[in-house]
């Protein structure tokens, strides 16, 4: 909802309002992750069956995943805190923050998912957000070139991951 708010409703407000929204959302994510720390290593928190026959997709509270999530959200909060908003046009800043918040919303699912398909879908969303950022931040032909090359690099990494999975499946 913070990403939608930044992208649609805050395009015409001040850059400081957009920046404060991003700080507030990432701060809430850090607090939520800190609230999960006492439950690290516990049971699953959410379980659904998305596609029939694929088994239950659950979000677990693995200790490593929660610490990785805390490091990621804390780093994002500190990066946004250190970054100023002066000199940026509001439309570009709000779109940039919207994509950042969308990626940050998918990261917990990627870390906490205990099902390959759910983790893969969440990390694909993060990868698309990463590939979009140069286009938003740089704009023009240079931004398109960097966005396209980062997207291709991510696709090569995905192909390598799927190849490794198939090799492990064949070996086991």
Image (cartoon, rainbow, N blue to C red):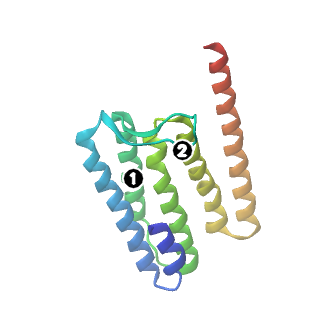
- Of all residues, the one furthest to the left in this rendering is 38
Rendered residue at 71%/57% (across/down): 146
Which numbered disc, 1 or 2, marks the residue closer to the eye?
A: 2
Q: Quadrant of the N terminus?
A: bottom left
Residue indicated by mark 2: 50
Viewer-closest of 166 and 56: 56
**Residue farthest to the front, as pictured:** 52
Q: Which residue is mark 1?
A: 73
Q: Residue at x 77, y 67 (%)?
A: 141
Q: Position of residue 104 (x, y in %)?
A: 47, 56
Separation of marks 1 and 2 at Cα, in angstroms:
27 Å
Question: In the rendered picture of this protein, how many numbered marks are placed on residues?
Answer: 2
Q: Residues within 10 Å of mark 2 (few under 14, many from 20)?
A: few
Q: Nearer the viewer, residue 63 or 91?
A: 63
Q: Residues within 10 Å of mark 1 (few under 14, many from 20)?
A: many
Residue at (57% x, 39% y) in the render: 52
User: Is 18 or 53 nearer to us in this picture?
Assistant: 53
Q: Residue at x 28, y 46 (%)?
A: 36
* Label 2 SS: loop
Q: Position of residue 46 (x, y in %)?
A: 39, 44
Describe residue 117's horizontal placement relative to residue 143 as left or right: left
């Amino acid at each position: 909802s913070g990403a939608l708010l930044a992208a649609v409703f805050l395009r015409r407000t001040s850059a400081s309002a957009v920046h404060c929204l991003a700080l507030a959302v990432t701060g809430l994510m850090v607090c939520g992750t800190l609230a999960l720390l006492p439950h690290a290593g516990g049971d699953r928190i959410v379980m659904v069956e998305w596609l029939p026959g694929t088994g239950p997709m659950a979000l677990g509270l693995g200790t490593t995943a929660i610490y990785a999530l805390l490091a990621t959200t804390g780093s994002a909060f500190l990066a946004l805190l250190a970054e100023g908003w002066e000199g940026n046009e509001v439309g570009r800043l709000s779109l940039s923050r919207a994509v950042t918040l969308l990626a940050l919303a998918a990261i917990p699912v990627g870390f906490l998912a205990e099902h390959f398909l759910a983790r893969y879908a969440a990390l694909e969303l993060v990868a698309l957000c990463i590939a979009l950022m140069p286009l938003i931040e740089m704009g023009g032909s240079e931004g398109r070139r960097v966005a396209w090359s980062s997207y291709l690099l991510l696709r090569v990494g995905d192909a390598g991951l799927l190849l490794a999975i198939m090799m492990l499946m064949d070996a086991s």
